[in-house]
Amino acid sequence: MPSANQQKTTKKFKCPTCETIETVTGAPGEHIIVTCPSCKTTGKAILPTTTDHTHHKDSKAAIVITHLKKMFGDFTAVDDVTFTVNTGEIFGLLGPNGAGKSTIIRMLCTLSRPSAGSATVAGYDIIDQDSKVREHIGLVSEKMIMYDDLTARENLALFGRLYNIPEPQLQQRINDLLTFVRMEKWADARIGTFSTGMKQRINVIRALVNEPEILFLDEPTLGLDPQSTSDIRDLIGKINTDQGTTIILTTHMMSEADMLCDRIGIIDKGNIVALDTPANLKKLVSGTDANVFEIQISNLTPHMITAVQASPAVKTITQEDETHIKVHVLGPGAFDTIIDLLRKHGAKVALVRNIEPTLEDVFLHLTGRQVREKVSETVNHRGRGHGPRRRQTSRVR
Ligand SMILES: Nc1ncnc2c1ncn2[C@@H]1O[C@H](COP(=O)(O)OP(=O)(O)OP(=O)(O)O)[C@@H](O)[C@H]1O
Ligand SMILES: [Mg+2]
């Protein structure tokens, strides 16, 4: 693959004032100022990180999405989304609440009709060949569709019969799947007696009864306890490696996407703002001369934060807790500048760690906001756009 800076990419931007569409060309991931040719409104825009999202030229695309759009009345839930999911990969759609993740999944699973654009899933068109699409996919939707009064086996069989799978074959398949998730001894117990984690394991294998090529998982670990979350994440990896199933999952959890996904599309307000491997996405923050430092200051004051923030070497600064700040610095010598500045303001620097940026840092870098909406409500905005943010130490969801 050519390196990002050798490539050129183009993207259409709609002027927020007069709605004129302007096509902009530049390097993938480049941050540019766009001036509307009609009304001269200027705004910041980010070009997609890849020119062609089909990275693995030898692999067949499992899903091809072209200019997909979904409107609800006047509201644009999904806005001109284009990307490709490669066969055999785990692809993550990562974004905050209301970003449009489920709406994309629902269109790809033929449950909702696009307002514009098109997509193929397993080679079939989601509009003209919807029943073919459904034969080749499994869906674990946000809402668990299970009958508490039925046993695990009965729930799975009920679903399998919708696919007209011959009974002996279906029972064999159910036994194999129950063994796959180590639930064979619970086969004939009623689902209503299960813990949420057990239910979710059955819910996930329910979507595998028809041996789908592509599995859609919409927030598969939402609401689960830590042990069940870990079990479901292991299961997702196992389905992908043991069964070769292509997986597209949605999540608002940065660590989940990072841990599971080969590639991630970061979605915000119906737009894909970046798409790449987790490692490459992090390079958007930590370029060759950019670094993220966690600094522990035993006598941290707002005054010190303001001073650091004012330095041109600082891109963003986040207050993690009473004594820790996380600083994204840019340029050679930036680290020394920051430490000198802190000492000048009387800071007692107890510890400095050069840390790898997280996907949360990537989202903050791209959108100026944090993914966790509830946490960002507690953010203390000061100064310029990426100013210091005070984050609760306890995580929401
Ligand atoms: N049927 C609908 N009618 C009107 N608006 C809708 C409908 N479905 C979704 N929306 C809106 O579209 C936007 C995207 O919703 P969507 O459910 O796709 O978000 P999401 O990324 O899955 O969020 P979450 O993390 O909360 O599940 C939201 O603003 C939502 O309110
Ligand atoms: Mg959703």
Image (cartoon, rainbow, N blue to C red):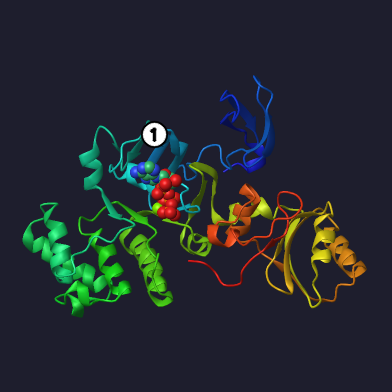
Q: Is mark 1 within 8 Å of ligand 1?
A: yes
- In the image, residue 64 sits, relative to residue 347, either above or below, namely above
Q: Position of residue 330 (x, y in %)?
A: 78, 53
Per the image, the residue denoted by label 1 is 73
Report helix, strand or loop for mark 1. Answer: loop
Q: Nearer the viewer, residue 123 or 205?
A: 205
| Residue 161 placement: quadrant | bottom left
Residue 121 or residue 368, whichever sits in front: 368
Report whether 2 appears left or right of 210: right
Position of residue 223 in the picture relative to residue 337 (left or right): left
Which of the 4 image quarters holds residue 356? bottom right
The answer to whether 63 appears left or right of 393 in the picture is: left
Q: Residue furthest bottom?
A: 185
Which residue is rendered at x = 59% and y = 26% of the image?
23
- Residue at 66 percent across and 21 percent down: it is 39
Q: Is residue 269 above or below residue 281?
A: above
Q: Which amino acid is tagged 1?
A: Gly
Residue 146 place in picture, x, y as percent: 21, 63
Which residue lies most toward the right here?
A: 344
Q: Quadrant of residue 229?
A: bottom left
State which quarter of the image contains the N terminus: top right
How many residues crowd mark 1 within 10 Å: few (<14), some (14–19), many (20+)? few
* Up/down of 314 relative to 183, above or below: above
x and y percentages locating residue 32 in the rendered image = 69, 36
